[in-house]
Image: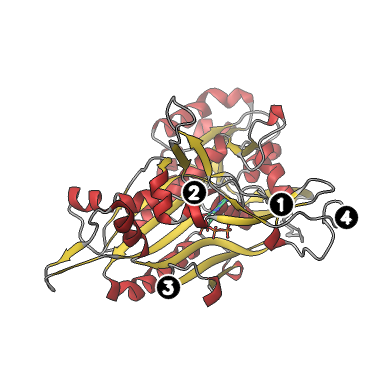
Amino acid sequence: MASNKFEVTLEKIVSLCKRRGFVFPSAEIYSGLNGVYDFGPLGVTLKQNIKKLWLENMQKWPEDVVQLDGAILGAESVFKASGHIDNFIDPMVDCLNCKKRFRSDELDLDKPCPSCGIKNWTEVRQFNLMFKTEVGAMTGQGNFGYLRPETAQSIFINFKNVLSSTRVKIPFGIAQIGKAYRNEITPKQFLFRMREFEQMEMEFFCKGENADKFFDTWVERRSQFYKDLGLDQKKVRLRPHEKDELAHYSKHCIDVEYEFPFGFKELEGIANRTDYDLSQHIKHSKKDLSVFDTDKNESYVPHVIECSVGVERLFLTILFDAYREDEVEGESRTLLKLSPKIAPITAAILPLSKKLSENSKKIYEQLKFNGFKVQFDESGSIGKRYRRQDEIGTPVCLTYDFDSEKDQKVTVRNRDTLKQERISIDQIEKYLKDLLQK
Ligand code: ATP
């Protein structure tokens, strides 16, 4: 196996995702909807695996982290209180010549338009990123709702419900995985900046005096998560926000950044949001969201540490990180070096000849029945079938040949080392379970 130099580009990832059924541009047959994507069979599984690992990681610590699945459609009053109606804005500018629209903070307005080369800008305007919609049959009555721009607000407004309906005690967290919508001015870089995406957010409620300690704890835990995921640590960095970059409610914020081909960019934000969110909702709803401290005999408003990452942004990061090109026996191959825990397919069952289909298919069906993510592929040369599996990141292929009929063994071929070993058919499940534990 010769490992040759290769460059991973956004174009290569986009093309692989489409070719192999990970991600499709939404409404493609109608020329698409910008910033919106549909996930194909392998993409769905990859996303599910990412979400499962995230949740397991959130819930393995000594403190309780419970789940919430809040509504996507949010009341205007919620986003008034949260500040999104007034402050969730990006500055926007249009080119009067080519009519292209840009975020003005990403441009030098003293220079001509990067699209048409002519300098003829409109005034900078503030653009709210929330999708607004009318609720109910009576239009024009001013009953507005918003597609949530983050999952966090439904956690804050349900904080008291969770506290009073479960046995959790402060400090504890509420985790939520769900859709969020932002009418980004310039959706770009494929899954990096979308208009409809999923977030994995955890809001951790604690006493104010413990907030700094828990902030450090969560930064440490989240960094370890990305190490355990196998991301190339040379490409991961923690970037504390500068004072002038901090949101007004945030005391401390650290971004976990990944080095994409288009530079180091935010993957996850970890923030000490103080008691801002609950205080805002107390002020606007006039409901008491404070907690009684029996030691001090007084009420207090909990502080919040937030960990927030986009499912698709992590999906894209994982693909960039796993992408390889090399040469095997004079032929080039593309592979995704995905961890078995993340890979959409754990093993492919490949009969060497169509004559061996019947018995090898029984192995496949049994594995499938027992919950393993497996594929059966009998078309094309064995080399071609290996390449197909390499490209979607399948860690092992199990080849069933004529000897298998006699010795009841299959050949396991490893995606990364290309090493081959014979194992008994009745040992396959144990072999795959061990692989998934790694
Ligand atoms: P950015 O500066 O990249 O716009 P942000 O600081 O606005 O991000 P947050 O509001 O902190 O992002 O959102 C938390 C996480 O949600 C981000 O770290 C990112 O992983 C994800 N995310 C935010 N906006 C998008 C988007 N438009 N498309 C995909 N994922 C997103």
Number of marks in picture: 4
Q: Is mark 2 within 8 Å of ligand 1?
A: yes
What residue do we see at 83% from left, 55% from top?
A: 120
CA neighbours of label 3 inside 10 A, class few (<14), some (14 to 19), many (20+): some
Q: Which residue is mark 3?
A: 251
Question: What type is the residue that disc 4 sits on?
Answer: Ile
Question: What type is the residue that disc 3 sits on?
Answer: Lys
Q: Position of residue 241 (x, y in %)?
A: 53, 73
In the image, 140: left or right of 210?
Answer: right
CA neighbours of label 4 inside 10 A, class few (<14), some (14 to 19), many (20+): some
Question: What type is the residue that disc 1 sits on?
Answer: Leu
- The secondary element bearing badge 1 is classed as helix
Q: Position of residue 298 (x, y in %)?
A: 15, 70
Location of residue 241 with respect to 413 vertically, above or below: below
Q: Are marks 3 and 2 in contact (CB under 8 Å)?
A: no
> Which of the two residues, 426 or 23, is positioned nearer the viewer here?
23
> Which of the two residues, 125 or 271, is positioned nearer the viewer here?
125
CA neighbours of label 1 inside 10 A, class few (<14), some (14 to 19), many (20+): some
Q: Which residue is mark 1?
A: 10
Which callout, 3 or 2, points at the residue further toward the start of the chain? 2
Which callout, 4 or 1, points at the residue further toward the start of the chain? 1
Which callout, 2 or 4, points at the residue further toward the start of the chain? 4
| Residue 118, label in figure | 4
- The secondary element bearing badge 3 is classed as loop
Note whether residue 431 is visible. Answer: no
What residue do we see at 43% from left, 50% from top?
A: 79
